């Protein structure tokens, strides 16, 4: 059954998301997180720019240093109808890699903070204000599982959960300083000392259950931002039966 919310401004790009390679599936992979199906169900057009980002970062794993560089290629200043109403920035899992073990992905904590702020400021400069931005902290790291993965790849453990936590806390501070929303996955997944390993497929990357967890906490934040969009198409009961084109091709008030 359609709803009035389901028909809000069809031509408005609703949701853009920047993610690191560890968590790109939570936005774009079929059968993982039900984000696309939930966003398609409201009949909104999406611009999920990780489709470009992920084509690059699957090979190496993107960090904020690289994301900051390509962001202007992905979201540019346009007319008001082209501006996304919600943008998520989901980085930290790669930035927090240990410098000695993974220097290519590692980004120092102070630079990570500066890069996040730079992306928020850039978005503001192209008419995506802070109240449309959602920062997402990296999730916790299951060191035992990830170490086993590293050994299989012929390398040493290259991340520590305590270090990931430092980056998560820094992300929270950036959100507070910049006035954006934030989703603190690192804390939520470890709440009450629960076993968070089922949320991760290999200790680092999100599992299907982890994707569901992210969606359940992220969607309410996005929904708040898209619920205010004006209606473009009429509610289905309001479509003129004899001449539907009057309703569907006009201003929606017929």
Image (cartoon, grey):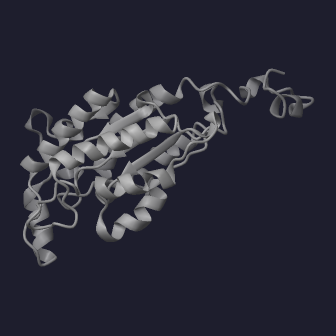
Query: Relative to 85, is 23 above or below?
Result: below
Which of the 4 image quarters holds residue 1? top right
Please report the residue visible at 20 percent of the width from the left and 62 percent of the height from the top.
202
Which of the 4 image quarters holds residue 173? top left
Q: Nearer the viewer, residue 137 or 63?
A: 63
Q: Nearer the viewer, residue 182 or 187?
A: 182
- Horizontal and vertical percent for residue 157? 8, 65
Q: Residue furthest right?
A: 242
Query: Relative to 123, is 158 above or below?
Result: below
Please report the residue visible at 30 percent of the width from the left and 33 percent of the height from the top.
182
Q: Nearer the viewer, residue 78 or 187?
A: 78
Q: Is residue 26 visible?
A: no
Number of marks present in the image shown: 0
Q: Is residue 72 left or right of residue 61?
A: right
- Horizontal and vertical percent for residue 250? 84, 29
Q: Is residue 65 left or right of residue 233?
A: left
Please report the residue visible at 10 percent of the width from the left and 74 percent of the height from the top.
155
- Horizontal and vertical percent for residue 132? 45, 31
Q: Is residue 97 visible?
A: yes
- Horizontal and vertical percent for residue 110? 17, 45
| Quarter containing the C terminus | top right
Query: Relative to 132, is 116 above or below?
Result: below
């Amino acid at each position: 059954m359609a709803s009035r919310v389901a028909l809000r401004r069809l031509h408005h790009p609703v949701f853009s998301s920047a993610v690191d390679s560890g968590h790109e599936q939570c936005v774009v992979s079929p059968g993982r997180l039900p984000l696309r199906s939930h966003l398609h169900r409201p009949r909104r057009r999406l611009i999920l720019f990780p489709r470009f980002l992920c084509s690059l970062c699957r090979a190496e794993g993107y960090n904020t240093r690289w994301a900051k560089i390509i962001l202007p290629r992905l979201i540019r200043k346009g007319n008001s109808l082209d501006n996304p109403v919600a943008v998520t920035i989901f980085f930290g899992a790669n930035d927090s890699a240990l410098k000695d073990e993974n220097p290519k992905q590692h980004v120092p904590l102070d630079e990570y903070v500066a890069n996040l702020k730079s992306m928020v400021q850039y978005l503001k400069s192209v008419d995506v204000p802070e109240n449309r931005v959602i920062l997402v902290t990296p999730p916790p790291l299951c060191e035992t599982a990830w170490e086993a993965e590293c050994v299989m790849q012929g390398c040493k453990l290259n991340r520590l959960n305590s270090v990931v936590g430092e980056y998560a806390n820094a992300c929270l501070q950036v959100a507070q300083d910049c006035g954006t929303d934030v989703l603190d996955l690192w804390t939520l997944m470890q709440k009450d000392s629960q076993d968070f390993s089922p949320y991760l497929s290999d200790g680092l990357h999100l599992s299907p259950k982890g994707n569901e967890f992210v969606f359940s906490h992220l969607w309410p934040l996005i929904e708040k931002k898209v619920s205010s969009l004006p209606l473009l198409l009429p509610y289905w009961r309001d479509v003129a039966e004899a001449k539907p084109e009057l309703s569907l091709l006009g201003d929606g008030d017929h």
